[in-house]
Image (cartoon, rainbow, N blue to C red):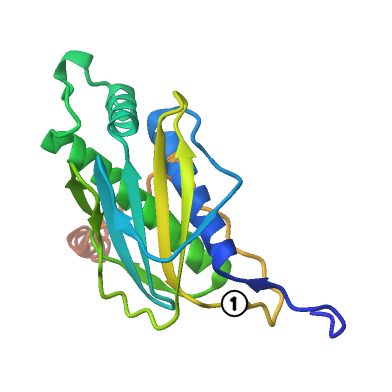
């Protein structure tokens, strides 16, 4: 890195953008639809679970944080239905209410995929490691203030509005310790692994030739010693 070039820094807003991009990438791919978020972000004093479906996950390691996604009933049902229909399920087999356990389970699985995508990106781009707990999903009919011990000494909190392709809204809230990453050496971040490409590569690779067993080798040696 050039001594006269100011070092690159990554702060709360950069981490928030990375997390938002994980949300749009995972949910967009799962629902085969366009998910987008607002260009404006809110600074908030505390995070909370809100109706109709709230989900939270804790991060720890290189930095600590709490992520909450609050889905409206309409947004949750749209993502749930698109996800399962794209997996080949019939519409008649789908739940009809957002209060169904099946809807909560599917949204929890999608949240787990979002968190996994984000932690993977942190390892590749920031060269640090964070772990996550299993996302918790709750169906709510009133606002609940969430107080979770996330080991935050100087917490900063942000809220971002997201929209589905049918303009149903949901919200992401992030609480994180005030932190800043400073690049002191140049490096090239690893590319996001493509599971489909890896599977195709393994499928196309020629199968290794079976190694001769020890028994076959001993038999051939015996035949050669007998002049056969």
34 above or below 56?
above
The answer to whether residue 135 of the structure is visible from this angle is no
Residue at (30%, 34%) from the top-left corner? 76
Q: How many marks?
A: 1
Q: Quadrant of the C terminus?
A: bottom left
Question: Based on the displayed image, in which of its 4 quarters is residue 188 positioned?
Answer: bottom right
Quarter of image, res 98: top left
State the image coordinates of residue 205 (x, y, percent, origin top left): 45, 44
Position of residue 65 relative to residue 211, above or below, is below
- x, y percentage for residue 64? 39, 74
Q: Is residue 219 left or right of residue 25?
A: left
Locate the N terminus and report the quarter of the image it occupies: bottom right
Q: Residues within 10 Å of mark 1 (few under 14, many from 20)?
A: some
* Residue 128 vertical placement versus 72 (above, below): below
Q: 63 or 185, which lies in front?
A: 63
Residue lying at 59% horizontally and 70% vertically, measured from the top left: 11
Up/down of 151 relative to 225, above or below: below
| Residue most extreme to the left | 101
* Residue 20 located left or right of residue 187: left
Could you tell me residue 21's position as x and y percent? 52, 49
Which structural element holds mark 1?
strand
Q: Quadrant of residue 144?
A: bottom left
Q: Is residue 90 left or right of residue 45?
A: left
Residue at position x 84%, y 85% from top?
3
Write down the residue under mark 1.
Answer: 181
Q: Is residue 25 left or right of residue 132?
A: right
| Residue in view at x 39 percent, y 30 percent | 31
């Amino acid at each position: 890195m050039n001594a006269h070039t100011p070092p690159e820094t990554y702060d709360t807003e950069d981490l928030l953008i990375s997390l938002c991009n994980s949300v749009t990438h995972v949910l967009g791919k799962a629902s085969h639809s366009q998910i987008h978020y607002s260009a404006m972000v809110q600074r908030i004093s505390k995070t909370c679970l809100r109706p109709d479906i709230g989900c939270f996950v804790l991060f720890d390691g290189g930095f600590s944080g709490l992520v909450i996604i609050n889905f409206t009933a309409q947004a949750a049902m749209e993502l749930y239905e698109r996800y399962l229909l794209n997996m080949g399920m019939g519409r008649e087999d789908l739940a009809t209410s957002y209060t169904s356990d099946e809807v909560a389970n599917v949204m929890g699985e999608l949240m787990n995929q979002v968190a996994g995508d984000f932690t993977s990106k942190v390892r590749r781009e920031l060269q640090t490691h964070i772990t996550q707990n299993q996302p918790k999903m709750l169906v709510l009919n009133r606002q609940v203030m969430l107080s979770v011990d996330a080991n935050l000494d100087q917490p900063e909190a942000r809220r971002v509005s997201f929209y589905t392709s049918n303009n149903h809204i949901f919200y992401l809230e992030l609480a994180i310790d005030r932190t800043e990453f400073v690049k002191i050496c140049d490096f090239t971040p690893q590319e996001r692994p493509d599971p489909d490409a890896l599977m195709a590569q393994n499928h196309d690779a020629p199968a290794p030739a079976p190694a001769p067993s020890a028994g076959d080798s001993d038999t051939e040696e015996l035949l050669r010693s007998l002049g056969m």
